[in-house]
Image: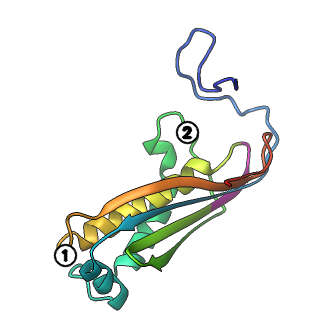
Amino acid sequence: MSKLTHIGPDGAANMVDVGGKPATHRLAIASGRITMSAAALYAIRAGDAPKGDVLGTARIAGIMAAKRTGDLIPLCHPLALDAVNVDFAFEDDGVRATATASLTGKTGVEMEAMVAVSTALLTIYDMAKAIDKGMVIGAVRLIEKRGGKSGDWKAE
């Protein structure tokens, strides 16, 4: 079993000390989706939602959220990100969001990518809820990470 790095010898939650770690290039990709009615999907695709440009606003929200991950997740380090990208793909019954976060630093960017995806999906919900309050957000997960002490990882 892996040792939980955020738990100290006394069992208390701790922020991991990354001071002695070398800075390396790190990248993480996360994905998630929101399912919705045909009417909501049509409005988003047509750029016809009541609140305006749904995907443009969701992209900006995801990028902004990634930059604030250290403020949102208690034991995450505040990171100086090199890049954050949020992309969308239309699916038969919804929209898939994919976020990529990268930096050269001492700790990974997995949480930043997942916060970006989650916030982008929540923003889609907020902007289209007038059409469909029953939208469902799910399947938020890490797809890939590169760099760092533990090396590369990719979801199967």
- Residue 93 is left or right of residue 86, and the answer is left
54 to 24, vertically: above or below? below
The quarter of the image holding the C terminus is bottom right
34 to 1, vertically: above or below? below
Q: Which residue is mark 1?
A: 131
- Disc 1: CA contacts within 10 A as few (<14), some (14-19) or many (>=20): some
Q: Is residue 108 magenta?
A: no
Real-space Cα distance between discs 2 and 1? 36 Å
- Taking the spot 73% from the left edge, 43% from the top edge, the residue there is 106
- Disc 2: CA contacts within 10 A as few (<14), some (14-19) or many (>=20): some
- Taking the spot 53% from the left edge, 15% from the top edge, the residue there is 12
Amino acid beneath label 1: Ile
Amino acid beneath label 2: Cys
Report whether residue 24 is seen: yes
Q: Earlier in the sequence, mark 2 or mark 1?
A: 2
User: What is the magenta range?
Assistant: 101-106
Q: Is residue 102 magenta?
A: yes
The answer to which of 146 and 79 lies nearer the viewer is: 146
Q: Which residue is mark 2?
A: 76
- Residue 83 is left or right of residue 21, and the answer is left
Residue 21 position by quadrant: top right
The answer to which of 130 and 19 lies nearer the viewer is: 130
